[in-house]
C-alpha cells in the first residue's frame, strides 16, 4: 500500500472548490493544511493536493523538488498515520497541503513535520466533531 495512485490525487475542480471554500485549515510550518470531509464514496479514504507557490519559488525545479519530497513523505506515512485512523469514517477526506516555507528543507525535516501534521489533523477533526 506504499504506492501513490492517481485516485489518491485531488484533481476535480468541484472538490478543489469545496476544499478551499468550506474547508478548515491550520498551519504547521512549513505546511498549511486545509481539510474538509465530502459525502462521496471513494476507493481510498483520502485525496490530497500538494501546492507550492510560484510567487515564492520562481524556478520550477525548486517547486518540483519540494513537491517530490512532500509526495514521498506522504506516500510512506499515509497508511499508518492517515488511513488507519480514517478507517471507520464513511466520508472522503479532502486534504490540501500548501508549502509556505521560506527555504527548501531536507527530506528528513519534511518527513517529521508531515507526521506531526497528521497528528494535529486528527486533533482538529476531533475538536470539530465534538
Image (tube, rainbow, N blue to C red):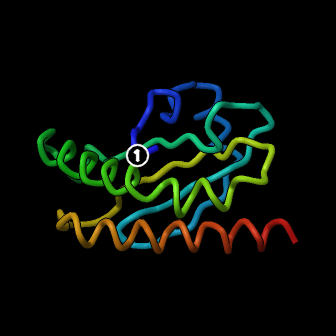
Residue sitting at x 46%, y 41%? 49
- Picture coordinates of residue 110 (x, y %)? 30, 66
Quarter of the figure with residue 6: top left
Circle 1 residues within 10 Å: few <14, some 14–19, many ≥20? few
Q: Secondary structure at mark 1?
A: loop
Query: Is residue 123 something that shows in the picture?
Result: yes
Q: Residue furthest right?
A: 130
Residue sitting at x 62%, y 53%? 35
Residue sitting at x 56%, y 40%? 47
Quarter of the figure with residue 14: top right
Q: What is the count of numbered marks?
A: 1
Q: Is residue 49 left or right of residue 119?
A: left
> For the C terminus, which image quadrant?
bottom right
- Picture coordinates of residue 67 (x, y %)? 28, 47
Query: Is residue 20 something that shows in the picture?
Result: no
Q: Is residue 46 left or right of residue 54?
A: right
Q: Is residue 108 above or below residue 97?
A: below
Question: Which sits in the foreground, 52 or 111?
Answer: 111
Question: Which sits in the foreground, 92 or 53?
Answer: 92
Q: Residue furthest front?
A: 1
Q: Is residue 90 left or right of residue 8?
A: right
Quarter of the figure with residue 106: bottom left
- Picture coordinates of residue 20 (x, y %)? 60, 44
Residue sitting at x 53%, y 66%? 118
Q: Is residue 5 above or below residue 90?
A: above
The residue pinned by badge 1 equals 2
- Picture coordinates of residue 94 (x, y %)? 62, 44
Amino acid at each position: 500500500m506504499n504506492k501513490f495512485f492517481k485516485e489518491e490525487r485531488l484533481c476535480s475542480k468541484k472538490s478543489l472548490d469545496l476544499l478551499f471554500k468550506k474547508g478548515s485549515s491550520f498551519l504547521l510550518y512549513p505546511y498549511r493544511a486545509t481539510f474538509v470531509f465530502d459525502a462521496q464514496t471513494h476507493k481510498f479514504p483520502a485525496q490530497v493536493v500538494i501546492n507550492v507557490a510560484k510567487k515564492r519559488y520562481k524556478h520550477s525545479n525548486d517547486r518540483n523538488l519540494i513537491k517530490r519530497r512532500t509526495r514521498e513523505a506522504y506516500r510512506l506515512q499515509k497508511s499508518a498515520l492517515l488511513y488507519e485512523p480514517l478507517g471507520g469514517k464513511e466520508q472522503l477526506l479532502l486534504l490540501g497541503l500548501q508549502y509556505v516555507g521560506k527555504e527548501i528543507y531536507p527530506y528528513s525535516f519534511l518527513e517529521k513535520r508531515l507526521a506531526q501534521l497528521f497528528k494535529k489533523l486528527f486533533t482538529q477533526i476531533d475538536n470539530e466533531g465534538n
